[in-house]
Image (cartoon, rainbow, N blue to C red):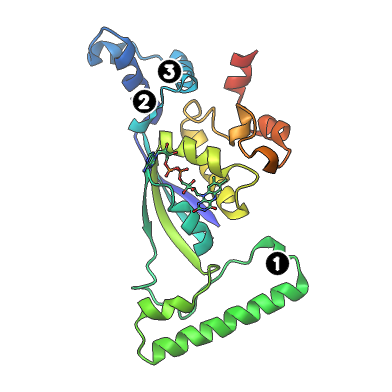
Amino acid sequence: MQVTLISYTDNPEQVCVQAGKVCYSPHGIKQIQKHLSKEKDGAFLARIIRMGHLSVIEHASFSFMIEGISRACSHQLVRHRIASFSQKSQRYVDEKQFDYIIPPSIAAHQDAVKTYNQFMEQTMAFYNELVDHGIPKEDARFVLPNATETKIFVSMNGRELLHFFEKRLCQRAQWEIRAAAEQMLDLVKKIAPNMFSTAGPGCVYGSCPEGTLSCGKSNEMRKKYKSAVHKESDS
Ligand SMILES: Cc1cc2nc3c(=O)[nH]c(=O)nc-3n(C[C@H](O)[C@H](O)[C@H](O)COP(=O)(O)OP(=O)(O)OC[C@H]3O[C@@H](n4cnc5c(N)ncnc54)[C@H](O)[C@@H]3O)c2cc1C
């Protein structure tokens, strides 16, 4: 899987800081801009995010290209409604030589992976036979597996990304969407560290939302995701 950050709002943290300051300042935007201070503004942004004033980070948008994921994973991804998607079409692009994702659990099992690969070859042959019979691609694709590799262009604003990270960085999220979320977080943290200083699975700042289904790794997750900004402010 490869995740690429294609573009993002220019100076995303500064844009959101200005939006936040509009709420708390009697001054107009020119004055607000005049008093922007990179050092203090980062802490201001992190603080209002912690307070839950999250509409402020809706003003920053991030676009990613995600390649080499399964259709099983992309189906989970597109359930996120406050995001925009453009995905490789199986109606327009033929899948005669489709690539497919092998889950690590299958890859690690010699016999299982052999059968899995055989199944994919048979499926490819069947798909090709349907297309060669003149069956439209949009119908021939009915035989394609969830494992079929896809690529998808995804845009989310800061608030939706935080929500997405909360759900999909959870150890109980499926490994593939979790891997995508981890790569996305690494990329946006470099650009907007304060905006994403609270990013992490639900258990990082509260009790595990999975309840009795918990992975039992809340402490490990807190260590992994609780950022320096928050460790300081908690102490
Ligand atoms: C642990 C887990 C298990 C899951 N299991 C299943 C399953 O078994 N079957 C299944 O079908 N799906 C399942 N899902 C997917 C889940 O139901 C959602 O489709 C997915 O999480 C994306 O939706 P969302 O509400 O999280 O956030 P988004 O769609 O990303 O929206 C973000 C937020 O915007 C708000 N919002 C968006 N749309 C609306 C709306 N129409 N009305 C009100 N508020 C809205 C909500 O506050 C929402 O949290 C699972 C998800 C998780 C995390």
Q: Is residue 199 left or right of residue 34?
A: right
What residue is drawn where x is 76% and y is 69%? 109
- Vertical arrangement, residue 19 with respect to residue 222, above or below: above
Q: Residue furthest front?
A: 212
State the residue position of label 3: 38
What residue is drawn where x is 37% and y is 53%? 85
- Vertical arrangement, residue 211 with respect to residue 133, above or below: above
Mark 3 neighbour class, 10 Å CA radius: few under 14, some 14 to 19, many 20 or more: few
Helix, strand or loop at mark 1: helix
State the residue position of label 1: 107
Mark 1 neighbour class, 10 Å CA radius: few under 14, some 14 to 19, many 20 or more: some
Cα–Cα gap, marks 1 and 2: 44 Å
* Identity, as a three-letter code, of the amino acid under mark 1: Ala
User: Can the viewer see residue 186?
Assistant: no
Q: Is residue 40 left or right of residue 61?
A: right
Helix, strand or loop at mark 2: helix
Percent coordinates x, y for residue 200 in the rendering: 58, 35
Considering the image in quadrants, where does the C terminus appear?
top right
Sequence-earlier tag: 2 or 3 = 3
State the residue position of label 2: 56
Cα–Cα gap, marks 2 and 3: 17 Å
Are the residues at dot 2 and dot 3 in contact (C-beta closer than 8 Å)? Answer: no
Tell me the mark number nearer the camera, choosing from 1 and 3. Answer: 1
Helix, strand or loop at mark 3: helix
Percent coordinates x, y for residue 176 in the rendering: 59, 55
What residue is drawn where x is 70% and y is 67%? 106
* Identity, as a three-letter code, of the amino acid under mark 3: Lys
Q: Residue furthest bottom?
A: 133
- Vertical arrangement, residue 55 with respect to residue 35, above or below: below
